[in-house]
Image (cartoon, rainbow, N blue to C red):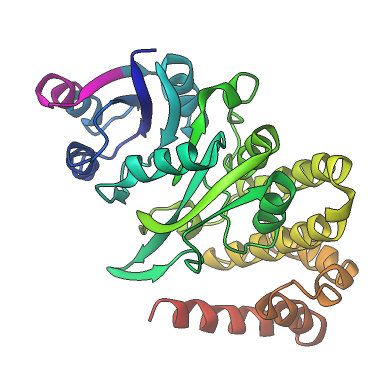
C-alpha cells in the first residue's frame, strides 16, 4: 500500500458540484492520500470532468468509469480498487474542512481503534445546524454502545461519510447493491467488526441537503427498503446484543413512521393509500415499542399518539408543520 488513506467519491451527474469537493481535498492538511473518483455512468459530463481533474489536479487522482449501478456499486468498486490502509467516503456534493482527513486519522492513532467518526453539520437552504453532539473532545465507545446510538439517532449517524475505516473491516463487508438506505445496512456491520470506535466532536463534514435528495423525493415503493433494511439490522443485532432488543424494536417502528412521512411528498391515489394503511396499522399495533421506551423521542411518541387519535389526516398536518419549522 503506497497511500495512507483512500478517499472514495462516487460520482453520478454532479458536474455542478464536483470541483468544489476536489478543491476542499487540495486544501487537506494530510498529504498522503489518494482520491478515487468512481464515475457511475454519468450522463451530464461528470465522467469527462473526472478525467480532466485527474490530469490537472495536484492530487493523486484515479478515475474508474463503470455502467450505472447505483451508489453501493460505485462505493464497492472504490473499495476494491483502493490502495490505502484506511478508507473514507465523501459524497461529491458535500463539503469538508481542511483537517477532515488529518482529524479522523489522528483519532485512530490516539485510540488504536480501527474506525473513527467526526461530527458533521447539516446545511439546509444555506443554513447550518449542528448534526451531532460536541460535548467531548473524543470518546471511545464499544460496538454495542455505538449501535445503540445509531438505533436511537443519538449522536451517532448511520451515514458512510464523516468516518474513517481500517480497510480490513471491508474484507467481507460490502454495501448492498440495488437497495436504498445502503448506509443503514452497512455501518452497524462495520462497527461490529471494529469492536471499538473513536468518536470525535469536531464538525469537519458538511452534509448539504438538496431538493433532489432521496429524503425530498416523491414516494416510490423503493423507499420501503428502509423498513426491510431496518428489519435485517434488527435480526442481526438482536442475536449479538440481546440488551438492545428494545432499541431495535423502537427503531423498527421509527422506520415505519419515517416511511409514512415520505408518502406525504406524493399525490394521493389508491395504491399510495393502501401503503399508508399498512404502515399506520403496524405503527399502532406496535405502539408500545415507542410509547413505553424512555429513550424514544418526544416527536416519535407524539407521532404515535396522533396516529391513534386523529389518524392519518391529523398526523399529516402535524408533520407538515414540523418540517416547515425545521427549515426556518
Seen as rendered, the residue at the extreme front is 110
Quadrant in the picture for the C terminus: bottom left
The image shows residue 219 at horizontal and vertical percentages of 56, 56
State the image coordinates of residue 163 (x, y, percent, origin top left): 47, 43
Q: What span is in magenta?
A: 51-63
Displayed quadrant of residue 193: top right
Along the viewing direction, whichever of 280 and 81 lies nearer the viewer: 81
Q: Is residue 206 visible?
A: no
Closer to the camera in the image, 242 or 142: 142
Screen quadrant of the N terminus = top left
Where residue 90 sits, quadrant-wise, is top left
Locate residue 261, reporting x and y percent.
Answer: 62, 67
Left/right placement of residue 194 relative to residue 130 reads right
x then y, percent, for residue 188: 66, 42
Identify the residue at image location x=83%, y=77%: 291
Which residue ends up furthest to the left in the rendered image? 56
Q: Residue at x 77, y 57 (%)?
A: 252
Asked if 169 appears above or below 309 in the picture, the reply is above
**In the rendered image, the vertical position of residue 258 relative to residue 100, given as above or below:** below
82 and 65: which one is in front? 82
Residue 123 in view: yes
Say if the magenta span includes residue 52. yes
Between residue 197 and residue 124, name the one nearer to us. Answer: 197
Residue found at x 85% / y 60%? 246
Q: Is residue 319 above or below residue 108?
A: below
Q: How many marks?
A: 0
Please tell me whether residue 287 is drawn above or below residue 34 in the rendered image: below
Left or right, residue 233 beside residue 191: right
Name the residue: 35% across, 54% down.
Answer: 204
4 falls in the magenta region: no
Amino acid at each position: 500500500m503506497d497511500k495512507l488513506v483512500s478517499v472514495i467519491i462516487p460520482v453520478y451527474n454532479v458536474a455542478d458540484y464536483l470541483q468544489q469537493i476536489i478543491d476542499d481535498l487540495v486544501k487537506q492538511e494530510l498529504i498522503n492520500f489518494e482520491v478515487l473518483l468512481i464515475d457511475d455512468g454519468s450522463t451530464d459530463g461528470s465522467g469527462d470532468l473526472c478525467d480532466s481533474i485527474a490530469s490537472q489536479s495536484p492530487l493523486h487522482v484515479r478515475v474508474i468509469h463503470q455502467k450505472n449501478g447505483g451508489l453501493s456499486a460505485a462505493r464497492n468498486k472504490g473499495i476494491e480498487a483502493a490502495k490505502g490502509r484506511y478508507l473514507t467516503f465523501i459524497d461529491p456534493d458535500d463539503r469538508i474542512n481542511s483537517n477532515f482527513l488529518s482529524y479522523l486519522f489522528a483519532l485512530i492513532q490516539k485510540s488504536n481503534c480501527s474506525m473513527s467518526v467526526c461530527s458533521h453539520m447539516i446545511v439546509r437552504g444555506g443554513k447550518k445546524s449542528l448534526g451531532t453532539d460536541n460535548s467531548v473532545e473524543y470518546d471511545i465507545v464499544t460496538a454495542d454502545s455505538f449501535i445503540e446510538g445509531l438505533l436511537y439517532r443519538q449522536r451517532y449517524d448511520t451515514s458512510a461519510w464523516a468516518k474513517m475505516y481500517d480497510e480490513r473491516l471491508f474484507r467481507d463487508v460490502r454495501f448492498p447493491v440495488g437497495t436504498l438506505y445502503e448506509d443503514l445496512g452497512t455501518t452497524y456491520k462495520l462497527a461490529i467488526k471494529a469492536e471499538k470506535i473513536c468518536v470525535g466532536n469536531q464538525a469537519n463534514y458538511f452534509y448539504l441537503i438538496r431538493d433532489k435528495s432521496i429524503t425530498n423525493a416523491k414516494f416510490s415503493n423503493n423507499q420501503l427498503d428502509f423498513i426491510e433494511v431496518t428489519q435485517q439490522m434488527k435480526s442481526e443485532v438482536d442475536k449479538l446484543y440481546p440488551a438492545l432488543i428494545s432499541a431495535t424494536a423502537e427503531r423498527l417502528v421509527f422506520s415505519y413512521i419515517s416511511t409514512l412521512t415520505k408518502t406525504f411528498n406524493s399525490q394521493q391515489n389508491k395504491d399510495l393509500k393502501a401503503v399508508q394503511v399498512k404502515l399506520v396499522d403496524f405503527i399502532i399495533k406496535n405502539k408500545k415499542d415507542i410509547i413505553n421506551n424512555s429513550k424514544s423521542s418526544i416527536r416519535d411518541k407524539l407521532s404515535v399518539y396522533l396516529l391513534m387519535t386523529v389518524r392519518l389526516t391529523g398526523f399529516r398536518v402535524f408533520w407538515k408543520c414540523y418540517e416547515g419549522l425545521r427549515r426556518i
